[in-house]
Amino acid sequence: MSVILATGPNGFPKLMLSHPAGSSAEVYLHGAHVTSWVPLGMEESLFLSSLARFEKEQAIRGGVPVIFPQFADLGPLSKHGFARVMPWQWVEQTQASETRPRAVLQLDASDETVAIWPHAFRARLAVELGENQLSLALSIYNTDAQPFSFNAALHTYLRVADVRHAAVRGLQGVYYRDRTAEGEVRQQSAPELTLSGEVDRLYLDAPSVVEVADNGNKRLFTLRAERFSDVVVWNPWKEGAAAMADLPEDAYRHMLCVEGAQVGEAITLQPGESWQGAQHLIAQPAG
Ligand code: TA6
């Protein structure tokens, strides 16, 4: 079987996806949180903190937290909304093709979510594994009798050999809100973004394809988004990491968050409507 239910720390259930060619991925039902992706012939490609907490109501530090229905602190809910700290259900296991394992996780509105956010909804995350590709598709359905609005992101912590030698490409000329400068809007002039300190940027109306060169590991990640209009790039650097109890101080060097996001403009769904945003991660060796 290409998708197996197993348990991780604290008995947290997780799904282990394995592709016949040798790639693999793991996703926890807690938060529908992908924590591991090993493309064919490569090392682990997602960063997961060695101090990550596997506890109820806590977000796992690393992997791909599902951000819904609020991004960051841009609203009345707790940071990044509640989807990443809720128990999701495994509802479907299918082969996307002859070889590609695929699992679908689902979160429905409950008394607990309605107490936080007063809307009936269904969220689904489809996780599909290829030889060198991991595709995540987040679907939101309005099952309410009233419209609602939301933001969403797939907050991807890529694992890099050394963030100081990594580069993000594809964002030249794009305007971004600099969240390290009270959201001031700036335009990126450089063809590639290299990091030498804290970066927390929300690129608005960004191109759908962005590349991350993990030069220390001689590999290139391509992120292709569908219907996510924005791109977030984040690394807390040394001081920011020191303030996080679940991140070892020097671990910031091995992570680079780059993600498809829908933040600049909220999505509004009428009763019965749905939205789907997808992010495809592709890993390739680079000379
Ligand atoms: O832009 C990404 C961001 O909102 C950062 O500001 C940073 O705080 C990060 O997400 C992680 O948030 P978390 O709540 O997981 O610590």
Image: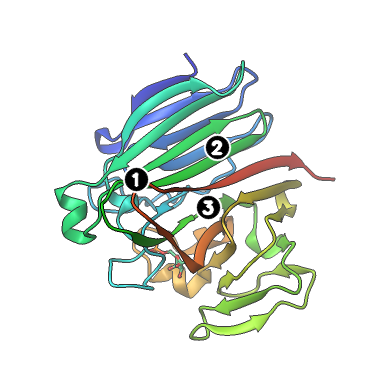
What residue is disc 2 on? 37
SS class, disc 2: strand
Along the viewing direction, whichever of 247 and 13 lies nearer the viewer: 13
Point out the residue furthest to the right here: 287
Closer to the observer: label 2 or label 1? 1
Left or right of 117, for residue 238: right
Q: Amino acid at mark 3?
A: Thr
How far separated are the C-alphas under marks 2 and 1?
Answer: 17 Å
| Label 1: few (<14), some (14–19) or many (≥20) C-alpha neighbours in 10 Å | many
* Image location (x, y in percent) of residue 86: 27, 47
Residue at (37, 52) in percent of width and height = 51
Tell whether label 1 touches label 2 (CB within 8 Å). Answer: no
Q: Earlier along the polypeptide chain: callout 3 or callout 2?
A: 2
Q: Which residue is mark 1?
A: 31
Q: Quadrant of residue 21?
A: top right
Q: Residue at x 19, y 46 (%)?
A: 110
Amino acid carrying mark 1 in the image: Gly
* Secondary structure type for disc 1: loop
Spatial separation of the CA atoms under disc 1 and disc 3:
14 Å
**Which SS class for mark 3?**
loop
The image shows residue 89, relative to residue 117, as above or below, that is above
For ligand 1, the image quadrant comes to bottom left
Tell me which label, 1 or 3, sits earlier in the chain: 1
User: Marks 3 and 2, Cα distance to the nearest angstrom?
Assistant: 11 Å
**In-image side of 70 versus 172 (left or right):** left
Residue on which the image places disc 3: 156
Q: Which residue is rendered at x = 52% and y = 59% of the image?
A: 261
